[in-house]
Image (tube, rainbow, N blue to C red):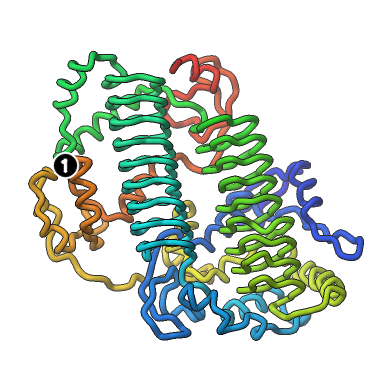
Amino acid sequence: MQRNCIVCGSAFEHTQDEQDFLGRISPVFRGKKYEIPPPTCCADCRLQRRLAYRNEKTLFRRTCDRTGKDIISVHAPGTGFSIYAKEEWWSDQWDPLEYGRDYDFNRPFFEQFASLQKAVPRMALQQEHNENSDYTNNVSYLKNCYLLFSADYSRDCCYGIWIERSRDCLDNFIIDECEMAYECIFSNKIYNSCFIYSSSQCRDSAFLRDCRGCSDCFMCWGLRGKQYCIANVQYSKDEYVAKRAGFPLSSYKNLQACKQRFDALLKDAVQPAMRKHGRVIDSTGDFLADTQNCSNCYELRFAKDCRNSVGFQVKDAYDCTYVSGEFAYESCECFPTPSHSAFNLNSYTGNSLFYCDLCMNNCQDLFGCVGMKKAQYCILNKQYTKEEYEELVPKVIDHMRSTGEWGEFFPIALSTFGYNISEANQYFSLRKEQVTRNGWRWQEEVESRKPDVTTKEIADDIHDVADSLCDHVFACDVTGKPYKIIPQELKFYRAMGLPIPRRCPDQRHSDRLALRNPRKLWDRACAKCSKPIQTTYQPSRPEVVYCEECYLKEVY
């Protein structure tokens, strides 16, 4: 079924498979199904809407609205929302039912929901079972970690997103089971290595792209089970050691030269149509690991039967970003997502939740609720009996149909975050005047300590850097924003033999993101056999892209 997006006007296809899924996830009350209608927006506009509700990595100093104590939060001060420290939010000192209100059939649902959001306290940070890891969010079981986001079971790691089961790692994106890894992207089981991209089970290496089971390799791509290679040329151990000594990465100047040389090398490299790990069956997208029957999915791992989704350990999820669990539609940041649910934010576990935000601890049968814990049969935070709930929700849905709200995700205008600090801005960048013209929130920058020295005063070689470096604030070479080198970070650079970066952590993260392709599929032909393929490499790009069969013949 061809449809036109009501936001951008582009044509998009709504498949029978997607329509069948909507039928399966639609709520049923007293034997009658209340069908979720087909989407009115294209997949990109739906994604933009969800990502506007995710502040991935911007933290603020503010006070807890319950205790007045200083806290760290993803919510900026002065936004009009009530923010509690995590411990206060989970305490029994307040009751979300106190904010309950009757449903008003004379007002749009989203207007009523926005009023409830403003009233109910929100958690400053979402953390669980951490030790000495205050400056983190959407994390669990961390120890001695700093500015880590969407991470679990890691220790002694800094500046990373999607860092799983790793230790002593810095400046990484989507890594798993790594140790002493620096500037690695979509890689797993990497040890004592840096600048590794879409690779696995590699050690003692630098500047690798799509390599598997390699050690002591430098500036290589597409290798399998190799050792002592430079620029895809095989050497003996002694030859490798001698040649490798000519590329000392401890010097910032030499490191930049190596980056340029590797970029030039990759211009002649063959690219796979999809970057993936493990068994990826009947799936399309990029950065997939162990997926089956997943289409137009990105950064998705251990998943089955998903569409337009991002997440980990997911099944039957359509249009979901950063979720785990199963059977969910149009939800964001739900780990694990409530089952048989749709249109949810920041809600973990449970069943049959619709249009809920920050509802935790196995809630059941909620509609339009905020901040609930172990609750059931509530609408706008008001408690009902089972019979009352099942009678009222259908009336609410009918009212939302009349206002055009039923089946739509929360409008961007209701987001608790400024658009510019949300993840939406990474993929759908807008200027301030565009954001404000749309009626969306914009977060002004908070003043921080100003730089007192320039990066020109940093020693070129890490071996010449003194401990006093950590006493200074530097200006990023790209953005001019202030940044510091913390002692834990300096210790890591010395251990790895790497120079001090001249760019702030935010810019380094942006540089890593720039190495990914857009979350968009194009039709093009394999450069080897001319077989039709779907890939994130736009046809007009110069890369040589092979289908999976031809690529495997090339690298094995």
Secondary structure beneath disc 1?
helix
Horizontally, residue 209 falls left or right of residue 27, namely left
Residue, x 50% and y 38% (percent of image)? Answer: 287
266 in relation to 163, above or below: above
* Residue 272 spot, x, y in % from top left: 48, 26
Tell me the quadrant of the picture where the C terminus can be found: top left
* Residue 518 spot, x, y in % from top left: 48, 42
450 in relation to 88, above or below: above
Residue, x 85% and y 71% (percent of image)? Answer: 390
Within 10 Å of disc 1 (Cα), the crowding (few <14, some 14-19, many 20+) is many
Horizontally, residue 194 falls left or right of residue 178, namely left
383 in relation to 327, above or below: below
Residue, x 46% and y 62% (percent of image)? Answer: 129
- Which residue in the protein does label 1 denote? 252
| Amino acid beneath label 1 | Tyr
**Quadrant position of residue 107:** bottom right
Q: Nearer the viewer, residue 286 or 208?
A: 208
Tell me the quadrant of the picture where the N terminus can be found: top right
* Residue 90 spot, x, y in % from top left: 54, 74
Residue, x 29% and y 25% (percent of image)? Answer: 217
Q: Nearer the viewer, residue 345 or 535?
A: 345
Q: Nearer the viewer, residue 405 or 6?
A: 405
Horizontally, residue 504 falls left or right of residue 125, namely left
* Residue 310 spot, x, y in % from top left: 56, 47
